[in-house]
Image (cartoon, grey):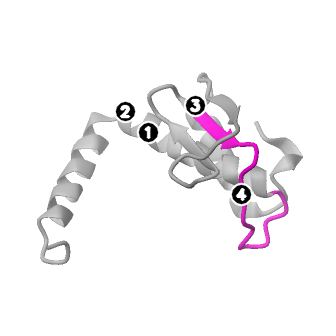
Amino acid sequence: MFGQTIGENEHIKHLVNLLSAVFKNKKVNLKFVDGWYNENPAHYDHETNTIVLNINGIYNNSNGFNNIVAQTLLHELIHAATVETIKHSPELRKELETLFDRVKNSAYVK
C-alpha cells in the first residue's frame, strides 16, 4: 500500500499492515486544497471518505520522521480506519458510546 515511502521503522510497518487490512477492498479519496480546515493542514472527512491536504500547510516534524507529508497521510488514514471500524462494528460502537457517557458524566469533566 505504501511501499518504501513510509520508512523502515518497524512500528510504522506494522501500522501500515493493519491499515492495509482495513482498506483491503475500499478506497479513500485524497484531495489537495489551498486553504485551512480549523487551522489544521490536513483532515479526514468521514462523510465523503476523503483525506484533505492543504498544499500550503506547514507540516511539523517533531519525532524525527523523514517524510512529514507521508506521516500526515498516515495520521489521517488512522482516522479513516477508526471510522470504518466503528461503522462496521455495532458492538464496538456501543462500547465506545458507553465509555463516552461514563467520561462525560464523571467528576473529571464537570
Q: Earlier in the sequence, mark 4 or mark 3?
A: 4
Residue, disc 4: 12
Q: Which mark, by number, is residue 87? A: 2
Specify few, some or many for label 3: CA neighbours under 10 Å numbering under 14, 14-19, or 20 or more: some
Residue, disc 1: 83
**Does residue 99 appear to the left or right of 60 in the view shown?**
left
Q: CA distance from mark 3 to mark 1?
A: 12 Å
**Does residue 53 appear to the left or right of 4 in the view shown?**
left
Q: Earlier in the sequence, mark 3 or mark 1?
A: 3
Q: Quadrant of residue 64?
A: bottom right
Query: Of all residues shown, which one is farthest toward the right?
Result: 4
**Magenta stretch encompasses residue 61:** yes
Q: CA distance from mark 2 to mark 1?
A: 6 Å
Q: CA distance from mark 4 to mark 3?
A: 22 Å
Residue, disc 3: 50
Q: Quadrant of residue 31?
A: top right
Quick check: 91 above or below 47? below
* Mark 1 or 4: the one toward you: 1
Residue shown at 64%/51% (left/top)?
41
Magenta-colored span: 51-67
Residue shown at 70%/39% (left/top)?
34
* Mark 3 or 2: the one toward you: 3
Of the pair 14 and 81, the residue shown nearer to us: 81
The answer to whether the residue labelled 3 contacts the one labelled 1, judged by CB atoms less than 8 Å apart, is: no
